[in-house]
Structure formats: structure tokens, C-alpha cells
Amino acid sequence: MFFLLFLKERWAWITFIFILLLFINILFFLDAGFSGISVSYFNIITLMLVLFFLIWRYIKETQGLAHFLGNLSNPIEFLYSENTSLTPFQRKYFEELLNVIEQKENLLNQSRVQLLEDTEAQLAWVHEMKAPLTAMKLMIEQVEDLKLRSRLENEWMRTHLLLDQQLHHTRLASIEKDNRLEKVALKSVVFKEIREFQSWCMDKGIGFQIDVLVQETISDKKWLSFIVRQILSNAIKYSRENSEINIYTEIDDAGHLLLHFKDFGIGIRPEDLPRIFQKSYTGTIGRESVQSTGMGLYLAQKACESLGIAILVNSELNKGSVFTLKLPLQNEYQNSFGR
């Protein structure tokens, strides 16, 4: 590979040598003064000298390249070292490259600082918004008109979910630092999230058929609750009125615990299925609803990746969908918890 690169690098010089050799041969043929010189002997000697020269340069330059690649971890020290194998032109190229890299690193550091400041400001804003939302919840509970209260509760829930998505979207980049591993009872997580959607479910007449859910898993309870929340909100949103959502578990052949959420709603179109976890993708049905942001399943899937959970979906149009959380047997988070 290096030899081909070497020939490609020196093709202009090699071509020039052969053209020069061809010119000299033509000159020998046309000029009678060179009739006593052996042209074949001259060509052989010249070609051998050229070949030895190329071999010597190949060995020299490949050694220099190996030395260069072996010192890329300390480019500045290598550049100004007495034993550097760089030619003057290579040194100039390398200096300019280091200047460009330094400028880009400075810009990258500035962007990181700005991103950190924006993230902190966004988190502060989300936490500030929680106080008026809590106050609104208390005021809504005092409304005597049941129909008006139901409408207000639905709008409050929508605002709460959007704010919750924004909070977890902001924290998603640092989810590994935010994790707290513990034994989590699936029943407590699922029932807590169902209670959060109580008013919405009552308004649509949606009930739940829930398995015993006695199993436990090792995960981050807050992020696992967020994942369940996104799947439940999606199931409720696209379920028909006066329908049911089934939640149950099973163990697959490899021993993985599977947590299923089955609704009997409008389902997902086949052309939308491969893209439902893409950021901001609302799908054909989602475009018909102002409540769809295309962020819930995207954030859930990203959180699942970080927790070692696989999120699967099976859906038929007009028959409903089944979202499945495939909980891991053992991953790096469980190992950390065990230590």
C-alpha cells in the first residue's frame, strides 16, 4: 500500500525521467557522433540507478511516515524536535495545519461554554415554570364546572408533558452523569404514570387492563418513568374513545423481561413505522393532530439506548399498536450497581 502511495506521490518525477531517457535514445539514434556508444548499456545503467534511487527514497520516506504517524499524539513536540523527519515543505504544511486545528479548538471550546450556559439557562427556566404549573393545578381542582375542569385539566396535562419533554431533552446529553441505579419495581413506575394521566383517560373513557407486574429491574427510576410516560401518552393520544390499554409482561427465550403496552387505537401506517423514532417526525397520522410534536418517541428511544433497553413496536393500521420495552439481563449499568 505504501509503495503504491509512493509511486503516486512521485509519478511526475518518474514520468520526467522516462521522457528524458526516451529523448536521449532518440538523440543517440539521430546523431551519428554517438554511433560508437552502446545504447543498451547506457539504458540499463540509467534504469538501475533510477531503480536504486527510488528504492532508497521509498525506504527513507516510509520510515519518515511511520515516525510521523507514531508521534501524532504530540504534534507540537514532534514538529520542533531535532529528530523530526519532516522536509521544509512538510514542516510548513504541518505548521499551517496546527494553526487551523488550534483555531478550530478555540471555536469548539467557545461553543461548548455557550452550550453549557444555554443548557443551564434552559433548565432554570423549566424549573421556574413548574411553580406556576403547580399553582394552576391547584386552581383547576377548585373549578366546580366539571366540563370546564376536564378541558382545563387536559390542557394542563398537555403543557406539563411538553415541559417534561423539554426538561429531559435538555438533560439527555448528560444522561450518563445523571443516572442513579437502583432496583425498580415495574408496578410502582407504571401505576404512578397511569395516575398522572387519570383525568385525560377519564375524559376519553380509556381503561387499563394491567398484569400483576411483580417483576423488578435494575435501572434509573426517573428515566425509566420518563420512557413509560412517553409510551403511555402516545397510547392514550391515539386510542379511540371508550377503549382499553393492556399492560403486561413476559419472558423471552433469552430470559429478557418484556414490558408490553398494547392499545386498540388507530395504529401506525407501514410507511411510518421505520421512522417513528426519528426526531420531530410526526408521521401521516401525527400531522392531523396539533398535539403531536414528534419528540416523545425520539426522546424515549434515546433514553432507552443509554439504559441498555430495547424499545420495539408492532402495529397494524386501524387495529392498534404494541410497544415493548426489552429490559436487559446485564449491562454496564448493572455491573456498576453490583460494585
Image: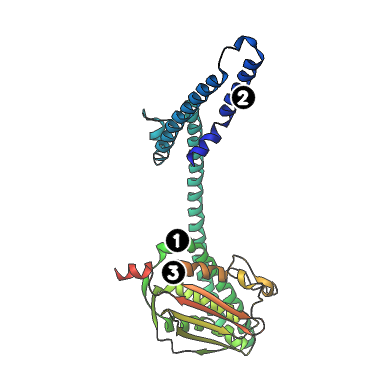
Q: Which element type, helix, strand or loop, lies under badge 2?
A: helix
Q: Mark 3 sits on what residue? A: 307
Front: mark 1 or 3? 3
Amino acid at circle 2: Ile
Does residue 187 appear in this view?
yes
**Label 1 to label 2, Cα distance in Å?**
63 Å
Which label belongs to residue 174?
1
Q: Residues within 10 Å of mark 1 (few under 14, many from 20)?
A: few
Q: How is the image coloured?
A: rainbow
Left or right for 132, reference 218: right
Q: Mark 2 sits on what residue? A: 19
Q: Quadrant of residue 155?
A: bottom right
Coordinates of residue 120 in the picture (x, y in percent): 48, 58
Eyeballing the image, is 134 above or below 100? below
Q: Earlier in the sequence, mark 3 or mark 2?
A: 2
Amino acid at circle 1: Ser
Front: mark 3 or 2? 2
| Residues under numbered marks 1 and 2 in contact, where contact means CB atoms less than 8 Å apart | no
